[in-house]
Image (spheres, rainbow, N blue to C red):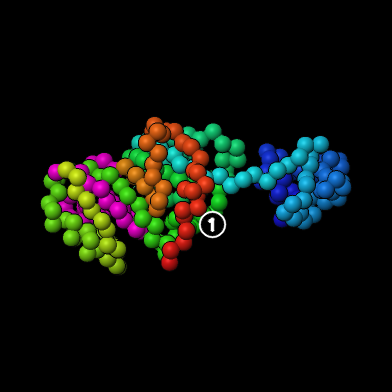
Amino acid sequence: MRLDRYISNASDYSRARIKHLVRQGLVLINGTVADSPARAVAEGDQISVAGAAIHTPRPRYLMLHKPPGVVSATKDSEHPTALDLLDEPRPEQLQIAGRLDLDTTGLLLITDDGQWNHRITSPRSHCRKTYRVEVAEALPDALVTKFHDGLWLEGEKRRCLPADLEITGTHSALLTISEGKYHQVKRMFAAVGNHVTALHRLQVGQIALDPDLAPGEYRSLTQQEIDSVTFHE
Ligand code: URA
């Protein structure tokens, strides 16, 4: 990786500032003054700027309990974004691994590891996601089979993959799906003449929303949670 990119990823220095510091001879690679911001650096190289060591930042893996009214995006002109709820350096490097609608609450995963994100969100990974759903009309038992057989959603060329519906009350259910079409859960219930009135994501793959997190709170994932995300094709 180029020296200037390495330092800007690992610190708050801009590329322009790094160029300037290199020209002043204040950037060292393994104790030797760097002669160009374009110089290649390798893993294990010791980099310092103005006497302070620069460490490669560890990738971040976060779970946020998303409250309603917060957009699953990095920028929005109208509403607060999920990133606005975080107190993290270099927020521009963070990505949302699987969005939720504005009114949906629950587990939102956020990372700066693009490959890990891909393993969750790639349609080929069939990552399972569990939602708690409340609906306007009573839920007949026959829906369990319908969801399992694969619903047809309006505007789609293929049936949905089999989904697990567990009816927990006259108007409430747990639904596990292994794909992530646009507004999928709301469209699935619309396809059977119902209407979702509340939607809350409980789990993504093996990662469950921590019950200790109040809406708006977040924490880092444990190593076990991070490692649980593997690619299933
Ligand atoms: N399905 C939806 O319809 N909305 C969400 O936010 C998530 C899944």
Q: Quadrant of residue 2?
A: bottom right
Cβ at disc 1 under 8 Å from ligand 1: no
Q: Is residue 168 left or right of residue 177?
A: left
Q: Pick the quarter of the image with the C terminus.
A: bottom left
Q: Position of residue 224 (x, y in %)?
A: 49, 48
163 w.r.t. 207: above or below? below
Q: Position of residue 200 (x, y in %)?
A: 31, 42
Q: Secondary structure at mark 1?
A: helix
Instruction: Name the residue located 70 percent from the left edge and 50 percent from the top edge.
Output: 5
Question: On the image, numbered disc 1 is attached to which residue?
Answer: 115
Give the magenta-colored segment's residue range.
170-199
Local crowd at mark 1 within 10 Å, few (<14), some, or many (≥20)?
Answer: few
- Residue 185 among those drawn in magenta: yes
Q: Residue at x 36, y 41 (%)?
A: 106
Classify residue 15 as left or right of residue 71: right
Find out whether residue 142 is within the magenta segment.
Answer: no
Which residue is depicted at the point 60% across and 40% down?
90
> Where does the N terminus fall, quadrant-wise?
bottom right
* Residue 76 x, y percent position in the rendering: 46, 40
Front residue (pair 163, 85): 163
Give the amino acid at mark 1. Answer: Gln
- Residue 158 x %, y %: 29, 67
